[in-house]
Image: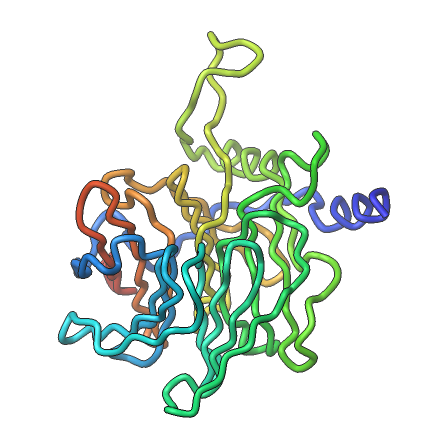
Amino acid sequence: MRNKFLLVVFGLIGAPTFSQDSIPYNLKLENQTIVLPSELREVSGITIIDSKTLGCVQDEEGLVFIYDLKKQAIKQKIRFAGPGDYEGIALVGKDLFVLRSDATLFRIHEYQSVKRSIDSIKTGIPNKDNEGLCFDSKNKRLLIGSKSKIAKGSEYKNLRTIYAFDLTQSKLEEKPLYTYDINSIKEFAARNHIQLPTKPGKKNPSEQEAALKFQLSGIYIHPKSNLLYVLSASDYYLFVFDSIGNIIHLEVLDPEKFNKAEGIAIMPNGDLYISNEGQTGDPKILRFSEDSKN
């Protein structure tokens, strides 16, 4: 079983030769900063409800917060479970899905109805720590991004995975949809002259090496380009991948602006929202419009 998995992984990774493509956002200059209430200090995931509303979760309480962007206020709270480590949220039709870090999904059926019901689904993802969740509407599935490696062993150290949960069968696809190799991402950065932050090398502290953990904290499919946007909060990166998992963009984020960027969502008009936990300050959502480079 172990060897079979390895064969699949290296077949997916390949040897990407893509050049850095631009994205339609200037992430150094936000169009709007929204300060969230203290209840969302640990905001860990966001999703688009409609053009004026976001759904939010925080990683301590089993509550969905429906947030009004115009009034900048919570307009509804929906209890779906007890305290836990909740990391992602996605809207699918009239239902909301919430991801707990142990890869359990909570489905809130007809979330706006007084007769709403809730199911919990153990997906069976082997990774211990899972944080990214988004809806892939074209393929009628949820994508689940794992922050941790898939298994013990040095051969898995630099691998990160995204799984697909088939909504028509309510079943996890057995093999990862995407498997990313951190070393390949470092090579992409080097080829495209992208300066990555560095840290002292483990074998030789006098030598600097690229600081890149690639611990997925948020994922979202761009509604126009269908590209997959991926956040790594712990080391301040935004990655963009094409539909077959090839990296096409890598951006180093400002640690002060994106102190702990764990939530990402994109409106149909292209407006990009990134949420940041409060930590020592206020929790915030930053909005970037597609024309912000002009």
Please count the marks in the image: 0
Q: Which residue lies furthest to the left in this view?
A: 71
Which residue lies at the image location 83% right of the left edge and 43% below the top edge?
2
Residue 183 horizontal side relative to residue 114, left or right: right
Mark yes or no: residue 224 visible.
Answer: no
Q: Which residue is drawn at the image coordinates 53% and 46% (left, top)?
A: 147
Q: Can residue 140 be seen in this view?
A: yes
Q: Give the image's coloring scheme.
A: rainbow
Q: In which quarter of the image is the C terminus?
A: bottom left
Where residue 11 sits in the image (x, y, percent)? 77, 48
Residue 157: percent from left, percent from top: 64, 34
Identify whether 181 is placed above or below 117.
above
Q: Is residue 48 above or below residue 102?
A: below
**Residue 266 percent location from the top left of the image:** 36, 68
Foreground: 97 or 30? 97
Q: In this view, does 176 lie above or below 200?
A: below
Task: Give the image location of residue 139, x and y in percent.
Answer: 61, 76
Residue 84 image-quadrant placement: bottom left
Q: Which residue lies furthest to the front in this view?
A: 82
What residue appears at the point 70 percent right and 36 percent down from the top-left corner?
A: 152
Task: Please tell me which residue lies in front, 269 or 179.
Answer: 179
